[in-house]
Amino acid sequence: MENMIKSPVTLTEGALVEIKKLMTAEDFDSTQLLRVGVKGGGCSGMTYVLGFDHSTDNDKHFEIDGVDCIMDKSHEMYLYGMIVDWQDGLNNRGFTFKNPNASTTCGCGTSFAV
């Protein structure tokens, strides 16, 4: 892949276990890659995107512990250095995002402002 770069984000061991579990599901589309990104919206202005998608010409490709990932080139400035974790507690279950670029975050932890 000509666009392969050093990983701009980190997936914790817990996040990797959960993502790899999703990838081994019977109905998983193995032509899709893990997309890490942002979109407008949320209570703080931008919302994190983490899901499986097909690559586009605007994407950078990187790999984290055997997981092929993509990120829109324009999103890297918002997400560089971010850590994605998986929480599996009684009060909070799901992916969490620790973003050093966020000036403010919302209470739910899924949106931010820069």
Image (cartoon, grey):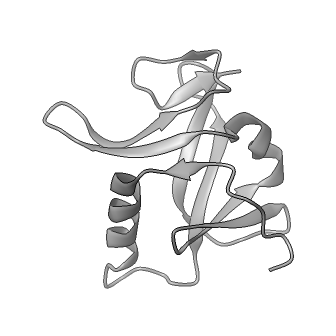
Q: How many numbered circles does the render carry?
A: 0
Q: Nearer the viewer, residue 82 or 113?
A: 82
Q: In percent of the image, x 54 and y 28: which residue is there?
A: 111
Q: Position of residue 110 (x, y in %)?
A: 48, 32
Q: Position of residue 19 (x, y in %)?
A: 40, 64
User: For residue 16, which quarter of the picture?
Assistant: bottom left
Q: In percent of the image, x 59 and y 24: which residue is there?
A: 112
Q: In percent of the image, x 69 and y 50: which residue is there?
A: 8
Q: Please state if 76 lies on the left or on the right of 49 as rendered.
A: right
Q: Is residue 19 above or below residue 98?
A: below
User: For residue 94, which quarter of the picture?
Assistant: top left
Q: Please state if 69 lies on the left or on the right of 12 as rendered.
A: right
Q: Position of residue 77 (x, y in %)?
A: 79, 38
Instruction: Give the position of the N terminus as an image quadrant.
Output: bottom right
Instruction: Give the position of the C terminus as an image quadrant.
Output: top right
Q: Position of residue 23 (x, y in %)?
A: 40, 75
Q: Is residue 48 above or below residue 58?
A: above
Q: Please state if 84 lies on the left or on the right of 18 as rendered.
A: right
Q: Is residue 65 above or below residue 91?
A: below
Q: In percent of the image, x 64 and y 23: which residue is there?
A: 102
User: For residue 21, which quarter of the picture?
Assistant: bottom left
Q: Nearer the viewer, residue 29 or 8?
A: 8
